[in-house]
Image (tube, rainbow, N blue to C red):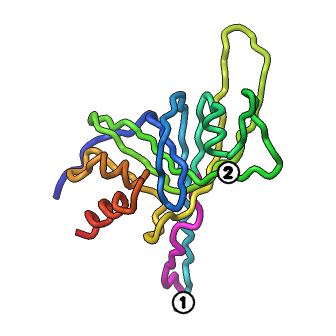
Amino acid sequence: MADNKKIASFGVSNFEYGIVTDELVQTTRKMSGLKEVKLELTNDLKTLAADNTAYLVLSGGITEAKETINIYDVDSKMKQDLYGIQVKKGVEVYSKGITPNYVATLFRTELSNGKHTWFGMLKGMFSLPDSTSKTQDGAPDPDPAEIVGNFVARGAEETILLIGREDNEDFDFDTFHKAVFPTAQSDVDALLNAVKA
């Protein structure tokens, strides 16, 4: 029996996103200033009782997927990409009928063995960030903007999340990146065919 290696995960960086159109992502954008990311996956379970005991547990699969991002600056370009707002003469215009775009996101955490874990959320929409301003007393102490995204399954495989660990023997970052941000169906097929092999 193999021993479990003592490894810890920490930190968050390398945030990247891209607009999903027809299940593909033509371009991506890397953002700095990432403070925190929280992923929440809900897997509904139902325990059936029979014969005076717990008889069977049924799973409804992933019924909800949320990603909460805290980032120090959601700039105008990111707002255009995520929310579909218009920028006219340097002014962000928020119309009542704006519709957010579907986006895919990517970020990584550090592992204490010197490797990384990569997280790819495949298709979701983010809500508009709140804005709170406060008086400055002493050194500046800004709060990051918080945006929350609700994610759904993407593609015929109905995939919501991909997690790639660099300490897994067969992990290839380029294949992983293309699966999160596919520019063609062949990018998705490359990962799926590897999984089926």
Q: Secondary structure at mark 2?
A: loop
- Near mark 1 (Cα within 10 A), the count class, few <14, some 14-19 or many ≥20, is few
Specify the quadrant that holds the C terminus.
bottom left
C-alpha distance separating marks 2 and 1 = 46 Å
Question: Looking at the picture, does residue 177 appear above or below residue 76?
Answer: below
Q: Secondary structure at mark 1?
A: strand
User: Which mark is first along the chain, 1 or 2?
Assistant: 1
Q: Residue at x 20, y 51 (%)?
A: 169
Question: Looking at the picture, does residue 29 appear above or below residue 138?
Answer: below
Q: Is 65 part of what is drawn in magenta?
A: yes
Report the front residue among 98 and 163: 98
Q: Which residue is mark 1?
A: 50
Which residue extends farthest left?
A: 1
Q: Residue at x 50, y 78 (%)?
A: 57
Q: Is residue 109 left or right of residue 60?
A: left
Rendered location of residue 178, percent (x, y): 37, 51
Report the front residue among 119 and 102: 102
Q: Residue at x 51, y 33 (%)?
A: 31
Rendered location of residue 24, percent (x, y): 47, 57
Q: Residue at x 61, y 43 (%)?
A: 81
Q: Which residues are magenta?
A: 53-66
- Near mark 2 (Cα within 10 A), the count class, few <14, some 14-19 or many ≥20, is some
- As drawn, the label of residue 100 is 2
Question: Looking at the picture, does residue 118 appear above or below residue 134?
Answer: below
Q: Main secondary structure of the magenta part?
A: strand
Q: Is residue 18 left or right of residue 84?
A: left
Specify the quadrant that holds the N terminus.
bottom left
Rendered location of residue 144, percent (x, y): 64, 30
Amino acid carrying label 2: it is Pro
Q: Is 190 part of what is drawn in magenta?
A: no
